[in-house]
Amino acid sequence: MGLVAGSVGKMIMKEGSGSWLSSLLFGIVGAVVGGWIGDLLFNRGSMSLFSPVSWILAIAGSCIVIWVAAKFFGARR
């Protein structure tokens, strides 16, 4: 789930650079962030792998993580 969510998040955020490892890390961290947000807002943070809501939350979380990373690391360039 992490690799797919990170790859889709990179496509949505137009962040094409990086390896599959960065996609995996963005996806894993994004899934945790998305699950946390889903638990806070909808009381649905912990779901199964095959739940569409789980995928949407993981992709949204990876977009948030990519945006934060771009703001944090983009300022150093």
Image (cartoon, helix red, strand yellow):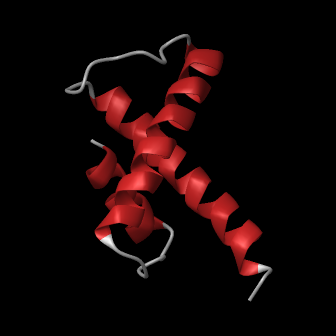
Foreground residue among 23 and 13: 23
In the image, what residue occupies the spot 26% across and 24% down? 51
Q: Is residue 8 left or right of residue 68?
A: left
Q: Please say if 8 is above or below 27.
A: below
The residue most toward the right is 75
| Quadrant placement of the N terminus | top left
Please state the horizontal and vertical placement of residue 20, each as a whole percent of the image. 30, 67
Please state the horizontal and vertical placement of residue 77, each as a whole percent of the image. 74, 89
In the image, what residue occupies the spot 75% across and 67% down? 72
Q: Please say if 66 is above or below 11.
A: above
Please state the horizontal and vertical placement of residue 59, each as a whole percent of the image. 42, 47
Foreground residue among 67 and 75: 75
Q: Is residue 43 left or right of residue 77?
A: left
Please state the horizontal and vertical placement of residue 41, each as a whole percent of the image. 63, 20
Q: Quadrant of residue 50?
A: top left
In the image, what residue occupies the spot 29% across and 53% down? 3
